[in-house]
Amino acid sequence: SQKIEQNSEALNIQEGKTATLTCNYTNYSPAYLQWYRQDPGRGPVFLLLIRENEKEKRKERLKVTFDTTLKQSLFHITASQPADSATYLCALGSDYKLSFGAGTTVTVRA
Amino acid sequence: DTGVSQDPRHKITKRGQNVTFRCDPISEHNRLYWYRQTLGQGPEFLTYFQNEAQLEKSRLLSDRFSAERPKGSFSTLEIQRTEQGDSAMYLCASRPGGSYEQYFGPGTRLTVT
């Protein structure tokens, strides 16, 4: 069966450090992968998209990698700030449809 | 605010009652999605519209759930004969053609007592 797994444990990091989140999947062949941020009680907010033929994408302090051989994406937040504290969701896309992982909660300590 | 809006934001209902939720997407977006999210889980796909056509409905969605998007604008999601297991956050998202980025609304939190 299809499965998307994100870091099972919440991530607690010191301000200024880099947070690295993982997204592993099985029995999928996604055309693209997206990362979203979700704050408590709110809908997810789109952050980055990476296509199957791309290895890395960057946007400001965010970086995402996509390895279709390993079936894994890594999401990095560099120079983290307390405002980065949230749940981050990985989503695999095929044509019009997204399948989400359960998310990883990140807490950045000042 | 020209984002996706949902109404109501919260709904408490007794088991067995019917409920209806509304979603107003971003006006130029012709694709609309409904998701359900429970605590500690990611959003789970329920159904998808392109304009007024409902193109896919999740196999997980029972016959008690129905969605419409008349005239390709706002959408409604109705749950008939609610059960306690229907308690969740119901999220609506929209996107324009040619882009995969989805814009989510704030959600409707349903509690079935």
Image (cartoon, coloured by chain):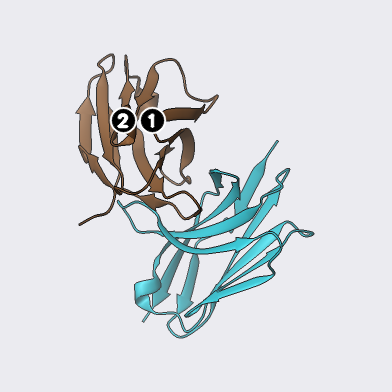
Helix, strand or loop under label 2: helix
The quarter of the displayed image where residue B67 is located: top left
Q: Amino acid at mark 1?
A: Glu
Res. B41 mark? none
Chain identifier of the brown chain:
B
Q: Position of residue A104 (x, y in %)?
A: 50, 59
Helix, strand or loop under label 1: loop
Disc 2 to disc 1, C-alpha distance: 6 Å
Which residue: 28% across, 38% down?
B23
Q: Position of residue A88 (x, y in %)?
A: 47, 60
Which residue: 35% across, 23% down?
B84
Q: Please give the residue where the numbered disc 1 appears in the rendered image.
A: B52
Q: Position of residue A13 (x, y in %)?
A: 48, 76
Residue contact between numbered discs 2 and 1, judged by CB atoms under 8 Å: yes
Q: Sequence order check: which comes first, mark 2 or mark 1?
A: 1
Chain for numbered disc 1: B
Res. B71 mark? 2
Q: Amino acid at mark 2?
A: Lys
Which residue: 39% across, 21% down?
B65
Which quadrant is home to the N terminus of chain A? top right
Q: Is residue B79 left or right of residue A90?
A: left
Colour chain A appears in? cyan
